[in-house]
């Protein structure tokens, strides 16, 4: 296998220098106010935000985890990732405009817009810690783990050298330039990272002899099932139950059910609600229908070349070291380091926004200057980074960490959706769902670690529901005045608000029909591309027809709706 040579180190060093300069160039603008530091002044255009969403989701951990899914479950296992595409489109059509109308700084802040009383204040404080510290540091922890795995596979040097350098640089420009630095460097890093994954997939493709070589190689290993887009019915009950869980349950039962903190932050920073919608829609298509296929091709090629490894997550860096020549190896690794940086900078800024906006400024120091809050934001980032490093040292699997975190919040997912469309949801609904879900998921991980992911997820959802539904009905509803103000400002619409407002907004039904059409467009183009790459002409043709037909219908509907608004 190849190791990094001097040319590769020059490429990586040049890349890090460019990103650092770009991030530092926006320092003065970010220091004006907390609003500038965390939301870029709320005037960022959709195309930058859409790329930023994709960049932070690209991350260094994603190709590592996708490689494991493909090696163990086949392409059907990628539905763990694609299921989030269903949710991403739901967020675009149902929630993106609602979030932008709220004018909040974080998704925890909306708690006191939606609910009333001391329970609302307590919930906002709790969610500031829950999302700002717990979730953010856990996510950064597995991103650190992924970078360590990648570096260990391509360099004989002490991996801490590159790891520490990249971490220090991203910390400096993120604390200096705030959200401006995050989105601008995301924009640059995304194209380098995407180009790197395409280059690696091309060399891997050539190494194994293209689609014919992949098919023949997998057949020799009796692993042809890995190219199936859905599991065979004879693949076993475990794989089929996983697949059904991915497509029927997972997309609505997780922390990103109505957007998720890092995406909500970008919706809130958009110029207006139309830019928030366009950014989210743009992100969904490039993230779930374009950038995933180079990872899948590389993963399939790794199975052909290396067989089933004890740790499939190491296959991706092994492919880099096997098929890439000097210079390109450095470029691809630079792209992955950039993916690492784009995720870390996002979660440092996002985590600090929760701590400052929903804990420090709301409950501890209420009337300080903007400069004071910006300074404290930077200090909080340092603390979050240290916690994340400590967590990384106690993880061993990226894909395993993904599944645990999704299960941890799964029971609260339905509540986060329903709070927009049913007036009766209150602060105790969220409290009970979040706490129950976290306790149940942790208990299952500790005492039933041998259970399938689908068993853990469904158990968490149903047991949590058995707690939050009674908690909702047995506690006092939010005051009518608070609900009316919320419904008039946010305009969520739907029959769930008839008890509060005489004529609820009727956009919900249109949004749901648009969402269904968008699913046809997304997965039609997605599988048309995959079928073409893997030599499946029937899949390609059928998928392309579906994609074109639904695209035409969706485009006409959106045009008619925009004319009606005018």
Image (tube, rainbow, N blue to C red):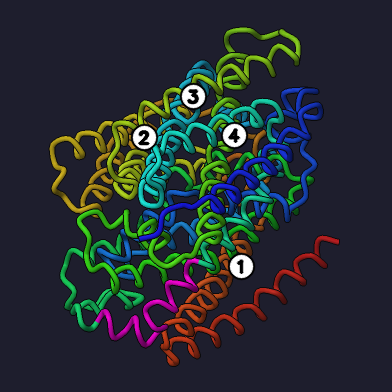
Measuring from the top left, give residue 377's x and y in whole percent.
62, 20
Measuring from the top left, give residue 141's x and y in whole percent.
40, 35
| Residue plotted at (65% across, 61% down) | 282
Gap in angstroms between the C-alphas marked 4 and 2: 35 Å
Q: Earlier in the sequence, mark 4 or mark 2?
A: 4
The magenta-colored residue range is 200-218
Gap in angstroms between the C-alphas marked 3 and 4: 13 Å
Residue 314 is left or right of residue 565, and the answer is left
Indicate which label's residue lies in the foreground, 4 or 1: 4
Residue 417 is left or right of residue 465, and the answer is right
Gap in angstroms between the C-alphas marked 3 and 1: 39 Å
Indicate which label's residue lies in the foreground, 3 or 2: 3
The magenta stretch spans residue 207: yes
Pointer 3 and pointer 1: residues touching (CB < 8 Å)?
no
Quarter of the figure with the C terminus? bottom right
Pointer 4 and pointer 1: residues touching (CB < 8 Å)?
no
Mark 2 lies on a secondary structure that is helix
* Residue position marked by numbered label 2 in the rendering: 433
Vertical side of 529 occupied by 495: above or below:
above
Q: Earlier in the sequence, mark 3 or mark 4?
A: 4
Mark 4 lies on a secondary structure that is helix
* Residue position marked by numbered label 3 in the rendering: 384
* Residue position marked by numbered label 4 in the rendering: 170
């Amino acid at each position: 296998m190849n190791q990094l040579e001097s040319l590769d180190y020059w490429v990586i060093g040049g890349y890090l220098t460019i990103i650092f300069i770009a991030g530092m160039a926006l320092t003065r603008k970010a220091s004006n106010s907390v609003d500038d530091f965390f939301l870029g002044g709320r005037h960022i255009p959709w195309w930058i935000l859409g790329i930023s969403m994709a960049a932070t989701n690209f991350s260094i951990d994603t190709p590592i985890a996708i490689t494991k899914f493909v090696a163990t479950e086949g392409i059907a296992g990628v539905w763990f990732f694609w299921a989030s595409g269903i949710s991403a489109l739901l967020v675009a059509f149902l929630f993106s405009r609602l979030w932008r109308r709220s004018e909040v700084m974080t998704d925890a802040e909306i708690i006191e817009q939606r609910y009333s009383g001391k329970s609302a204040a307590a919930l906002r404080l709790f969610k500031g810690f829950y999302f700002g510290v717990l979730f953010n540091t856990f996510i950064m922890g597995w991103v650190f783990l992924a970078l360590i795995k990648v570096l260990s596979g391509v360099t004989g040097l002490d991996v801490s050298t590159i790891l520490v350098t990249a971490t220090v640089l991203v910390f400096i420009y993120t604390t200096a330039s705030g959200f401006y630095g995050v989105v601008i460097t995301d924009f640059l890093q995304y194209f380098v990272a995407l180009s790197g994954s395409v280059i690696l997939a091309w060399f891997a493709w050539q190494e194994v002899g293209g689609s014919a070589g992949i098919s023949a190689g997998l057949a020799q290993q009796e692993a042809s099932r890995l190219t199936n887009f859905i599991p065979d019915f004879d693949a076993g009950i475990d794989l089929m139950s996983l697949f059904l869980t991915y497509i029927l349950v997972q997309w609505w039962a997780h922390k990103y059910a109505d957007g998720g903190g890092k995406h909500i932050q970008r919706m809130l920073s958009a110029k207006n609600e139309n830019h928030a919608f366009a950014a989210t829609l743009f992100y969904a298509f490039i993230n779930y229908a374009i950038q995933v296929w180079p990872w899948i091709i590389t993963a399939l090629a790794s199975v052909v070349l290396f067989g089933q490894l004890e740790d499939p997550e190491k296959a991706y860096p092994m492919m880099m070291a096997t098929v890439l020549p000097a210079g390109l190896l450095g470029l691809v690794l630079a792209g992955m380091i950039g993916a690492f940086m784009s995720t870390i900078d996002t979660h440092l800024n996002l985590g600090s926004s929760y701590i400052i906006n929903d804990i420090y400024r709301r409950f501890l120091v209420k009337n300080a200057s903007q400069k004071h809050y910006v300074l404290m934001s930077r200090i909080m980032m340092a603390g979050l980074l240290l916690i994340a490093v400590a967590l990384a040292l106690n993880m061993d699997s990226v894909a395993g960490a993904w599944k645990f975190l999704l299960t941890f919040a799964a029971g609260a997912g339905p509540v986060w959706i329903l709070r927009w469309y049913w007036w009766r949801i209150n602060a105790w609904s969220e409290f009970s769902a979040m706490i129950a879900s976290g306790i149940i998921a942790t208990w299952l991980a500790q005492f039933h670690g041998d259970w399938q992911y689908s068993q853990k997820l469904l158990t968490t959802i149903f047991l949590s529901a058995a707690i939050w539904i009674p908690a909702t009905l047995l506690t006092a509803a939010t005051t009518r005045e608070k609900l009316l103000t919320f419904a008039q400002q946010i305009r969520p619409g739907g029959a769930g608000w008839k008890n509060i407002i005489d004529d609820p907004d009727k956009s919900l039904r249109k949004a749901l029909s648009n969402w269904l059409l968008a699913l046809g467009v997304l997965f039609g183009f997605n599988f048309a591309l995959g079928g073409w790459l893997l030599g499946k002409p029937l899949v390609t043709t059928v998928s392309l027809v579906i994609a074109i037909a639904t695209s035409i219908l969706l485009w006409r509907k959106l045009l008619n709706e925009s004319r009606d608004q005018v």
